[in-house]
Amino acid sequence: KLLSKTSRTDRITVVLADIDGLKKINDKYGHAAGDIAISTVAAALRYACPEGSLCVRFGGDEMLAVYPGEAEMSQIRERFYCYLENLNRTAERDFEVNASIGIYVTQAGETPDFEEIVVRSDRLMYMEKEKRKAEQEKNKSEERIKSQLIDAVRDISKEYFKKQNSYLFFW
């Protein structure tokens, strides 16, 4: 119905969000925690999208928003991730809620049907998910290297002070 109200020259913004690790949250913390993750991502999507957007759950761990017009993609992305980041930092729970989004803006008449628009948003969302995973892996690798360097410096220092009959305390 929303698309039928747009003309061929109107732009449509579709945002697809996918919860990262919902199964892990469900398995480790229970389905009530999974429900919290779902409602958190839904709230982040509503917060990030322009007023007048239609936001719905689109599957087990996916949310979909449709806005009849052109929305600023970078603003949606920034607001979405900031919402989750702030909530993860302040919420008192044992798990973090993370998600990836794909945003596609099109002319209403550009594609044959709504499903194709969703497929395009889905592709962009999975590209975003892979990019975020790669960044997380890079950060983990850097942290591992830092930890190894600190351990090496600590070991060298201990040996040095041992030979000098001195004491150095590490904590």
Image (cartoon, rainbow, N blue to C red):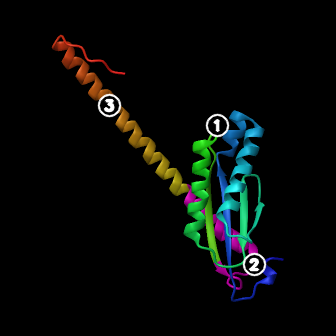
Q: Are marks 3 and 2 in contact (CB under 8 Å)?
A: no
Name the image quarter holding the C terminus.
top left
**Mark sitting on residue 92:** 1
For the residue labelled by badge 3, is the local secondary structure a helix, a strand or a loop? Answer: helix
User: Is residue 135 shown in magenta?
Assistant: no
Horizontally, residue 66 falls left or right of residue 105, namely: right
Which three-letter amino acid code belongs to the residue tagged 2? Answer: Asp
Which three-letter amino acid code belongs to the residue tagged 3? Answer: Ile
Q: Of the residues under marks 3 and 2, which one precedes in the sequence?
A: 2
**Mark sitting on residue 150:** 3
User: Magenta region: which residues?
Assistant: 106-129
- Residue 130 in the image: state x and y as whole percent: 54, 56
**Mark sitting on residue 113:** 2
Labels 3, 1: front one: 1
Classify 120 as above or below 18: below
User: Is residue 111 shown in magenta?
Assistant: yes
Real-space CA distance between mark 2 and mark 1, rounded to the nearest whole angstrom = 43 Å
